[in-house]
Amino acid sequence: MNIVAIDGPSGTGKSTTAKMVAEELGYTYLDTGAMYRAIAYLVESGELRVESFQNSQIKLSFDENNQILINGVNRENEIRDPKISAVVSKYSAVPAIREALTAQQREIASAQPCVLDGRDIGTVVFPNAKHKFFLTADYKTRAARRLLELQNAGKAGDETLESVETNLRARDKADSTREVAPLVKAQDAIEIDTSHLTIQEQVQKVLQSVSEAARCNNSLDTTHKG
Ligand code: DC
């Protein structure tokens, strides 16, 4: 199974990196955070109750631009709203929600070579993934990136560097202290601090390490055969 797992907190450039790496390798990109955001959006908009989540018939999928479809309807704009960012950790800590989304992620990525980004890909979803990365960056850099992203999407509203940083810190705390599948670096993941890297540089680091590992595997295969 060809899996590239890219974990780490928000604002470290995970999704942009994962998307570009997937494109370069010809793999499918799976944004697992978007799936948790979709559930948060459904609950917040009153379309779903957490208690009845297991019996619901929600279908999550992605269109050709990697935008999320909830029951066939594009909700990319809604799930990126800062109001959803502020509450998503509450829902991503619910075991039944994690269990269902993890199963769905495994199903999608078992059918095709995939680059997945998230918080628990290398630890829980695919602990045997061939390639694991854990991206980090300092808070000032992460907040600046997130704010710019919101401004570019016309979603910044009253947000400031301080309010974005406060949300990032709160989410990191919730994501890394929850009982099920907390945000932690897998022991065998390669850590990349992206604070002073451009997106191109971080993509290159990931691609380089993937191709080195593939070369190493090939030569091990030859040694075994030989
Ligand atoms: O990557 P993101 O900011 O879109 O993720 C949104 C939230 O979903 C994040 O606060 C934590 C949660 N998440 C998770 O718990 N597990 C994942 N594999 C992906 C995201």
Image: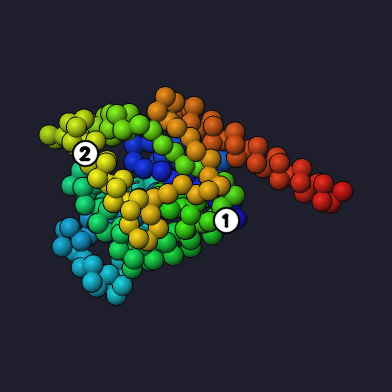
| Residue 30 seen | no
Q: Which residue in the structure is indicated by mark 2?
A: 166
> Does residue 117 appear to the left or right of 172 in the view shown?
right
| Looking at the image, residue 111 lies above or below residue 140 | below
Q: What SS does tag 1 mark?
A: loop
Q: Give the residue at x 17% y 58%.
A: 44
Q: Residue furthest bottom?
A: 55
Q: What SS does tag 2 mark?
A: helix
Residue 12 image point, x, y percent: 38, 36
The image quadrant that residue 159 belongs to is top left
> Does residue 136 appear to the left or right of 211 in the view shown?
left
The image quadrant that residue 41 belongs to is bottom left
Residue placed most toward the observer, 218 or 189 = 189
| Sequence-first tag of 1 and 2 | 1
> Does residue 171 appear to the left or right of 193 in the view shown?
left
Q: Amino acid at mark 1?
A: Asn
User: Quadrant where the N terminus lies?
Assistant: bottom right
**Label 2 lies in ligand 1 vicinity (Cβ under 8 Å):** no
Disc 2 crowd rating (10 Å Cα; few below 14, some 14-19, many 20+) is some
Residue 16 image point, x, y percent: 41, 37
Q: Amino acid at mark 2?
A: Thr
Of badges 1 and 2, nearer the viewer stands 2
The number of numbered badges drawn on the structure is 2
Are the residues at dot 1 and dot 2 in contact (C-beta closer than 8 Å)? no
